[in-house]
Image (cartoon, grey):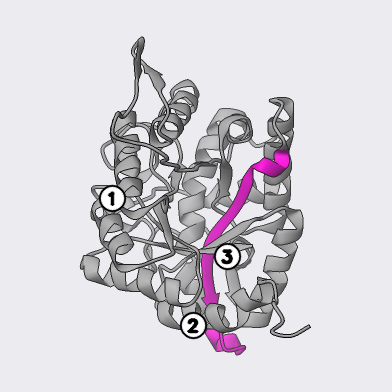
Amino acid sequence: MDFGVVLQTNPPAARTVAMAKRAEEHNFSHFWTYDSHILWQEPYVIYSLILDQTRRITVGPMVTNPATRDWTVTASTFATLNHHFGNRTICGIGRGDSSLRVMNAKPVGLSDFRRSIGVIKDLAGSRSAEINEATIRFPWSQGSHTPVWVGAYGPKALAIAGEVGDGFILQCGDVEIAEWMIKTVREAAAGAGRNPDDVAFCVAAPFYVTDGTEESRKHAIEQCRWFGGMVGNHVADIVSRYGTDSEVPRALTEYIQGRQDYDYNEHGKSGNTHVDFVPDEIVERFCLIGTAEEHREKLERLKALGMTQFAGYLDHDNKEETLRVYGETVIPHFTEKIQAKS
């Protein structure tokens, strides 16, 4: 199983690059960033710095969208990074949230969402794609490969993930919700004639390692409560589209009943003042909070459901220690042991 880190591209960029190098040192395989060009710095510029100063780690957005950039520009960026640094990029993509909502724009429609995935995957993979009744290809790109993983919550978007995505990203660490969503994506893949085992499954959620005391746990919950607010934005869209009695698990839809206004100026930030509606129970269900042993236990449950990568959000005050504990005790637990002598 792979492990990734998710981080905002707050200035200075040198700090983000340093965290990526630290993640690689602790054997994380992926370094993901937000892609919201108004709220944070442009991630693709920073990816080039990270790739230049690391040797193994794969970089990409969690998640980009088909609206703020032309699809061919996104694909060209990935193909260019691959040309210079080897195939060490990955594209997480969704319909658009903060990058669009801060401009009072709406997420893209499902049809364009599906088409964008194919175009980006083909062009970034050194293949041709159909755009505006023209067949185009990057003549300078050969042997490039960028997997496209789909971030989704609603039934129709989940179906797209299974039908055309190289992977599925669930931004929520709840075991019950993960079970339903992974099952839904697998069924969609099978229905499209694909092998469900060919679809990677990434669970992304804040991870905070505590010292085992109640005081430490309470502090971690407050540091991660923002995540319930971020997920709530997507859930609110699902409820408005499908209602509260849809096939979507009630564990995901019930908690937003007290949700009111949401301020994207505080998006993804600890101490967000618009997440009082998120109860402690939801924070603990959606995130990974506790001792290293508790983290391992929950990760085992998610792995049993089909998770192939866990990506942990580091938007809290315990970044370096969380990376250290994972590198020393959690990641080795899920790594194949190789004997020096047999």
Assess whether residue 197 is covered by the magenta stretch: yes
Q: CA distance from mark 3 to mark 2?
A: 18 Å
Which quarter of the rendered picture does the N terminus lie within?
bottom right
Q: Nearer the viewer, mark 3 or mark 1?
A: 1
Give the secondary structure at mark 2: helix
Q: Earlier in the sequence, mark 2 or mark 1?
A: 1
Identity of the residue drawn at 31% across and 63% down:
50
Examine the image and state in which quarter residue 212 appears.
bottom right
Identity of the residue drawn at 39% across and 76% down:
22
Residue at the far front: name it. Answer: 341
Q: Give 32 or 90, whichever is nearer the viewer.
A: 90
Residue denoted by label 1: 44
Residue at the far left: name it. Answer: 12
* Residue 61 spot, x, y in % from top left: 39, 50
Q: Give 272 or 338, whichever is nearer the viewer.
A: 338
Q: Give 68 or 83, whichever is nearer the viewer.
A: 83
Q: Give 2 or 138, whichever is nearer the viewer.
A: 138
Q: In the image, which disc is placed on residue 287? A: 3
Q: Nearer the viewer, mark 3 or mark 2?
A: 2
Q: Amino acid at mark 2?
A: Arg
Highlighted range, magenta: 196-216
Q: Are marks 3 and 2 in contact (CB under 8 Å)?
A: no
* Residue 332 spot, x, y in % from top left: 63, 77
Q: Amino acid at mark 1?
A: Tyr
Identity of the residue drawn at 63% across and 35% down:
162
